[in-house]
Image: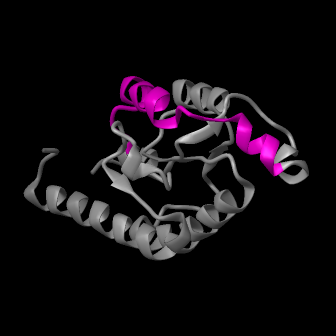
Amino acid sequence: MTNTNTQRETKILIVEDQYWPRIILGKTLDQLMPNYCPSYQPGSYDNATNIRDAERKIREEKYGMIFLDHRLPEEDMGDLENRDMNSYSDSLRNVGYNRLLPLIAQHNPDATVIGTSSLSEQISIKPEHQIDKCRCRETLESVLKKLYTQRETKELKGGNE
């Protein structure tokens, strides 16, 4: 693997609208990623909290890994999540996978997309990899182990299959 690929693989985007799941995912990444990618620096991931922000970042940056929620607000809702959860929930749309997966394929075709939606069973278009936010550490570690084992196997075979 070249240095450029390693650097791109460690560039991570978390697309998650809710504060606590985003914090837990980030902290879990900080704990686990150094085991799989020694060049990973804690806190070095980007966040997008709504569709518009995610679309902009996906177009402008090259990511190696994207954690993607499905239910997202169209734009920044400020602190509405803390003030009025019912109104906040009403602002969410089931568009994360439908709108962002094609955009990722176009602008970040080498990115590994890991879905974080609890609605995965109900969605026809979804990422290949999925984690359970309620069991974040356990499921994230399982996915990372699988991904990095596959990459090491490819490297040992000497190619990018």
Magenta stretch encompasses residue 7: no
> Left of 90 or right of it: where is 137?
left
The residue most toward the right is 83
Q: Is residue 59 above or below residue 93?
A: above
Tell me, what colour scheme is on the image? Answer: one colour
Q: Where is residue 141 shown, x and y percent of the image?
A: 41, 72
Q: Where is residue 103 shown, x and y percent of the image?
A: 44, 25
Taking depth in this image into account, of 150 and 72 the one nearest to the observer is 72
> Left of 35 or right of it: where is 82?
right
Q: Main secondary structure of the magenta part?
A: helix
In which quadrant of the rendered view does residue 142 lie? bottom left
Q: Where is residue 16 shown, x and y percent of the image?
A: 62, 48
Taking depth in this image into account, of 136 and 110 the one nearest to the observer is 136
Q: Going 44% across and 76% down the picture, which residue do you hit? A: 138
In which quadrant of the rendered view does residue 56 lie? top right
Query: The C terminus lies in which quarter of the figure?
Result: top left
Q: Where is residue 129 shown, x and y percent of the image?
A: 34, 54
Q: Which residues are magenta?
A: 85-112
Q: Going 48% across and 34% down the picture, which residue do you hit? A: 62
Q: Going 44% across and 67% down the picture, which residue do you hit? A: 140
Taking depth in this image into account, of 69 and 156 the one nearest to the observer is 69
Q: Is residue 11 above or below residue 92?
A: below
In which quadrant of the rendered view does residue 126 lie? top left
> Left of 35 or right of it: where is 76?
right
> Left of 80 or right of it: where is 25?
left
Magenta stretch encompasses residue 110: yes
Q: Is residue 106 above or below residue 85?
A: above
Q: Going 27% across and 51% down the picture, which residue do you hit? A: 1
